Image (tube, rainbow, N blue to C red):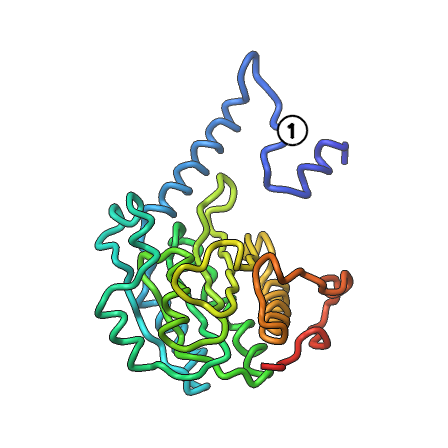
Amino acid sequence: MNPKEFWKSLTSARIGIGRSGGSIPTSELLKFRLDHARARDAVLAEPDFDTISLGLEKIFQPLGIDIIGIESLAKSREEYLLRPDLGRRISEPSRSRLESKKGIYDIALIGVDGLSAKAVDSNLVSFLQILVPLLSEQKYKISPFILGKLGRVAIGDEIGEILGAKAVVLLIGERPGLTSADSLGMYLTFDPKLGKTDESRNCISNIRPDGLDFQEASLKTAYLLSESLKRGISGVDLKDEMTPDFLESSSINLSNITNSA
């Protein structure tokens, strides 16, 4: 394998695409346009919430955890894209549903569509199938799972505050890239409440089979959560001090994850 083919085999990024005269080859131009169309579709489409709910029930019902659907203040996909602020707050009917579930929880798990329906359709349930058993082993008190429509990252602050959760783990469809329209993002916020800003969150990005795979992402999420609850911090105050060999292990190593909540 020549050096160019070797480097191309390591990434889906557009490197070493060559040229034809003063432009790129037609085949690469067509691939670019296809990826661009896929990215637009991911932003404009809505997830299949009915199918997602069926998958979530198989995960949470055996644990006795309810699933609650909520909506943001955005009334349509178009309004959601034009008014990001509306996606950060929940509707009044949603608030009422959450207030009826108020309690004392270690964590609130939330899934929202964000900017990629494909990410949520393809990866939300599969990721939770690995993450939730890992968190359950730590005996955390988990709130009802919240499935949100037309939501942004900050909507988790209001949800966590209403429910009475010490920390929020929010999973969201990320803004598509031109080679990755199905990336899921994880945002961890300790002591969630309205007014929190982005420096108070820890983020894991590019969760998908061709990016950070579900097991590695679950282990990293569980580790950050355990440290957040133990120290009472998140965001820029919480550094990733996971041992370097942790992600290289082929088996699940729980030594870095403890429940001190």
Q: Residues within 10 Å of mark 1 (few under 14, many from 20)?
A: few
The amino acid type, in three-letter code, at marker 1 is Gly
Q: Secondary structure at mark 1?
A: loop
Describe residue 11's horizontal placement relative to residue 185 as left or right. Answer: right
Q: Quadrant of the C terminus?
A: bottom right
The residue sitting at 76% across, 60% down in the picture is 244
Q: Position of residue 110 (x, y in %)?
A: 42, 68
Q: For the image shown, how many numbered marks are present on the structure?
A: 1
- The image position of residue 45, as x and y in percent, is 32, 50
Q: Quadrant of the N terminus?
A: top right
Residue 196 image offset from top left, x and y in percent: 45, 59
243 or 105: nearer the eye? 105
Q: Name the residue at 41% across, 64% down.
A: 156
Q: Is residue 252 above or below residue 156?
A: below
Q: Is residue 208 visible?
A: no
Q: Residue furthest front?
A: 195
Q: Dot 1 corresponds to which residue?
A: 16
Q: Is residue 22 above or below residue 7?
A: above
| Residue 105 seen | yes
Residue plotted at (40% across, 51% down): 116
Left or right: where does residue 5 sit relative to residue 83? right
Q: Nearer the viewer, residue 36 or 21?
A: 36
Residue 94 versus residue 45 in the image, above or below: below
Q: Pick out the residue farthest to the top.
A: 21
Q: Nearer the viewer, residue 161 or 72?
A: 161
